[in-house]
């Protein structure tokens, strides 16, 4: 099993920034990639970004390119999501997830929540106008 714990969420004004963290523990040797998703009330879980565990390759949802940056610190078993230029529409619970599969034949699979094997409990981000 892999345990994921997110932190770094909070209340921020529009235009502000936050750095979200996701600390992984347990059988992290099985992890091949990490992703960030978010879910707003009444909406489906939305893919944001993904990073490979060792190679550093990244993928982003078009909606967040240029505003969000995913990175990792393997020594700390931690993945980060820097979120900038926040808007009220970014208000949601932000989740990190771990995938035991490194690559898929189609990039679209990276965006599917059910492709990920482990999930954190989420961290709330609220953006005020």
Image (spheres, rainbow, N blue to C red):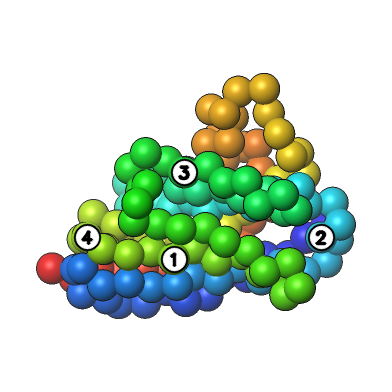
**Quick one: label 4, few (<14), some, or many (20+) residues within 10 Å?**
some
- Say whether residue 73 is visible: yes
**Quick one: label 1, few (<14), some, or many (20+) residues within 10 Å?**
some
Distance CA(mark 1)–CA(mark 2): 22 Å
Q: Is residue 46 left or right of residue 29?
A: left
Q: Which residue is mark 4?
A: 87
Q: In the displayed structure, would residue 6 be above or below residue 116?
A: below
Q: Is residue 122 left or right of residue 91?
A: right
Q: In the displayed structure, would residue 114 be above or below residue 6?
A: above
- 4 or 2: tag closer to the N-terminus: 2
- 3 or 2: tag closer to the N-terminus: 2
- 1 or 2: tag closer to the N-terminus: 2
Task: Classify the position of the N terminus by image quarter.
Answer: bottom right
Q: Are marks 3 and 2 in contact (CB under 8 Å)?
A: no
Distance CA(mark 3)–CA(mark 1): 12 Å
Front tag of 3 and 4: 3
Distance CA(mark 3)–CA(mark 4): 18 Å
- 3 or 1: tag closer to the N-terminus: 3
Q: Are marks 4 and 2 in contact (CB under 8 Å)?
A: no
Q: Which residue is mark 2?
A: 28
The picture places residue 42, in percent across and down from the top left corner, at: 32, 46
Distance CA(mark 3)–CA(mark 2): 23 Å
Distance CA(mark 4)–CA(mark 1): 14 Å
Q: Which residue is mark 3?
A: 60
- Say whether residue 122 is visible: no
Residue 82, label in figure: 1
């Amino acid at each position: 099993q892999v345990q994921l714990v997110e932190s770094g969420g909070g209340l921020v004004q529009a235009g502000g920034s936050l750095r979200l963290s996701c600390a992984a523990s347990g059988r992290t040797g099985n992890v091949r990639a990490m992703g960030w998703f978010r879910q707003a009330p009444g909406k489906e879980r939305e893919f944001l970004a993904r990073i490979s565990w060792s190679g550093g390759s990244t993928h982003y949802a078009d909606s967040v390119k240029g505003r969000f940056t995913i990175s990792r610190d393997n020594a700390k078993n931690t993945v980060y999501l820097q979120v900038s230029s926040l808007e009220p529409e970014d208000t949601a619970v932000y989740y990190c997830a771990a995938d035991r599969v490194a690559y898929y034949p189609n990039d679209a699979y990276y965006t599917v929540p059910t492709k990920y094997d482990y999930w954190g409990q989420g961290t709330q981000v609220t953006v005020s106008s």
